[in-house]
Image (cartoon, rainbow, N blue to C red):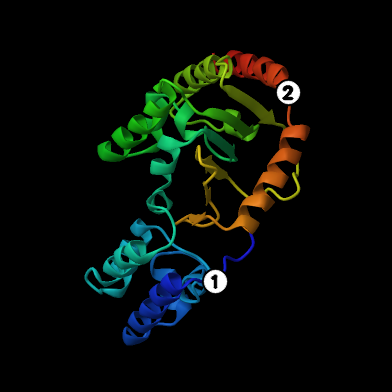
Amino acid sequence: MASRRPTPQTIAFGIELTSRREDAGLSRLDLANRIPVTRSYIGQIETGTTRCRREFAAELDTALDSGTAMVDAWDDLLKTSRYPTWFADYPLAEGTASLLRAYETMFVYGLFQTEAYIRALLLEEAAIEGRLRRQAVLQRENPPMLRIVLAENVLWTPVGGPETMREQCEHLLTMSACPNVTLQIAPFGFYRGMNGSFNLATQPDGGELLHMTTTRAGVTSTDREDILHVVSAFSALQANALSAADSREFLRKAVIKWT
């Protein structure tokens, strides 16, 4: 992922974090270990090249015993940011998108997860309900186009037991038949440029929000370099993944395997 160019807002947030960390007598590594994330991720936030999510700002407050200082700084960043409001929360971008693209390396794509699969993954009822609400975008009068690639191991990673996995694979088959969906399976292997899961939401006006799962906290970006890199790598991935028809046949075999 290319480093984002710092903005006055992200630089200000980074300065606040650096000040709070130093006041607490912590090194970047000390703070990273408390959360835990990598030291480099803390460094990226402090230099303004990465914008964390609000949830991560709350984790910083907990680690620094700083009350709500970092969350307040994050809220101030959003108020003064030049980015659209949906930058702050990927699900908001997802809900209004005209095109959704994703590559998932560990778990089934969130909008395609069954309730049983979700309940096996998530512990808190609020989180479960939130994920189910996100799926309402699929029921819109004009639902988004979806271009989704799942790594093969997603289908063989047991989540919730055989019955849950069988039901989940059957649901993927159903979703793959929708006219607005192209679902492909990427066989085991190395795919250049794909360093982890990502979600990319494209708005009707062309605005785009990228979310990459590269750390525990995740990273969101509207940087054109980041987006162009991911789009290029994703196009190559689609060309090397199984075709939509072959992917459906692969899913049928997965259903049998979990039966």
* Residue that badge 1 annotates: 40
Q: Residue furthest front?
A: 205
Question: Considering the image in quadrants, where does the N terminus appear?
Answer: bottom right
Name the kind of residue labelled 1 in the image. Ser
Residue 253: quarter of image:
top right
User: Can the viewer see residue 196?
Assistant: yes
Q: Residue at x 57, y 58 (%)?
A: 223
Judge left or right: residue 127 versus residue 217.
left
Query: Label 2: which residue?
Result: 243
The location of residue 119, given as percent across then percent down, is: 35, 31
Of residue 169 and residue 184, the one placed in the foreground of this image is: 184
- Which of the image's four quarters has the C terminus? top right
Give the SS element for disc 2: loop
- Name the spot of residue 31 as percent of width and height, x first: 41, 74
Q: Is residue 245 left or right of residue 108?
A: right
Q: Position of residue 4 (x, y in %)?
A: 57, 65
